[in-house]
Amino acid sequence: MRIATWNVASIRARAALVVDFLLREDIDVLALQETKCRPEQFPTAIFEAAGYQVVNHGFHAFNGVAFVSRHDMTDVTFGLPSLPGFGEQCLPTQPPGANGLPQEARALGVTVNGMRLWSLYVPNGRDLAHEHYAYKLRWLQALQQEVAGWLEAEPQLPLALLGDWNVAPLPSDMGDPDFVEGRSTHVSRPERQAFAAFESYLSDVVRPYVPHGYTFWEYRGGKYQADQGMRIDFILGSEGFSSAVTGAFIAADERRERQAAPGQKALKPSDHVPVVCEIAPELLGQSWEDEDDPMIWGL
């Protein structure tokens, strides 16, 4: 079974690319970030035609998180009341965060065959002096406290946090020369400390299989071609989840420009690429019926 995460930088612009990836790489569950659409704008039909269910969370044409899955999704949770909000204008459908400001669509939880999965789009931070940076740190702290509570209550819970963390936790995770420790977001000490706080409860399930590699390259300046990227997309799993992981990879080729078919316009890739882990369901201690196996009668 394959579980993945991908910041798609607009699902409406890249739905065909995402479906192609899902089918080509045999992905069972995909967490999406930066979908940039309201629920009614999500291109659900193309995913259902490919055999996937969709759950999505968005308020307007920025942020937004979703899941697409071959398997039933239950216990759907849109956001967390403890997370802070940001900004001034609040839509009627947009609840206030813990600080009274409008909560953005940055967290979506689902349960798939006993696994508790979260699609997360951590705030960018923008600049060390910007109020969005303080918001980012408060957001991460609130999430960490939630995770601690979940696992203290249920230590064996197969829990995974999947998404765009907007933090390069190790020096080797930053290859973009425009991001400098002490002057830039994504590599500041408070951000890295906030990320490290999750490691008391969770582990990066991909790094053991892929020690090096980036997941994001800016569009400008030929940074993908120069491999001046950063590793900011992660799958962090509890012991109950990580013990069932048997492999992982970063699908870096999804960042390259693809040639269009004759008479068609080329689809621009996202500036992020998918991060994938492979799960042996039997190691989760769950009963799992492989829906892809053919039924054999008369045995």
Image (cartoon, rainbow, N blue to C red):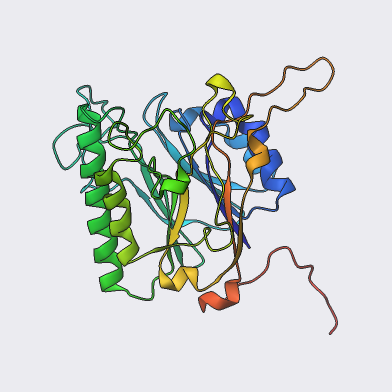
The quadrant in which the C terminus is found is bottom right
- Residue 289 figure quarter: bottom right
Q: Is residue 34 left or right of residue 152?
A: right
Q: Is residue 109 left or right of residue 266?
A: left
Q: Is residue 49 visible?
A: no
Count of numbered labels shown in the rendering: 0
- Residue 267 figure quarter: top right
Q: Is residue 159 left or right of residue 223?
A: left
* Nearest to the observer: residue 180 or residue 43: 180
Q: Is residue 280 visible?
A: yes
Residue at the image point whose x is 65% and y is 53% from the top: 27
Looking at the picture, how far across and down is residue 258, in whole percent?
Answer: 73, 28
- Residue 293 figure quarter: bottom right
Q: Residue furthest left?
A: 100
The quadrant in which the N terminus is found is bottom right
* Nearest to the observer: residue 197 or residue 156: 197
Residue at the image point whose x is 71% and y is 20% from the top: 266
* Nearest to the observer: residue 280 or residue 100: 280
Looking at the picture, how far across and down is residue 152, in whole percent?
Answer: 26, 72
Q: Residue furthest bottom?
A: 299
Q: As displayed, is residue 70 above or below residue 272? A: below
Residue at the image point whose x is 39% and y is 40% from the top: 166
Looking at the picture, how far across and down is residue 275, in whole percent?
Answer: 56, 49
Looking at the picture, how far across and down is residue 29, in whole percent?
Answer: 57, 53
Q: As displayed, is residue 191 above or below residue 150? A: above
Q: Is residue 185 left or right of residue 76?
A: left
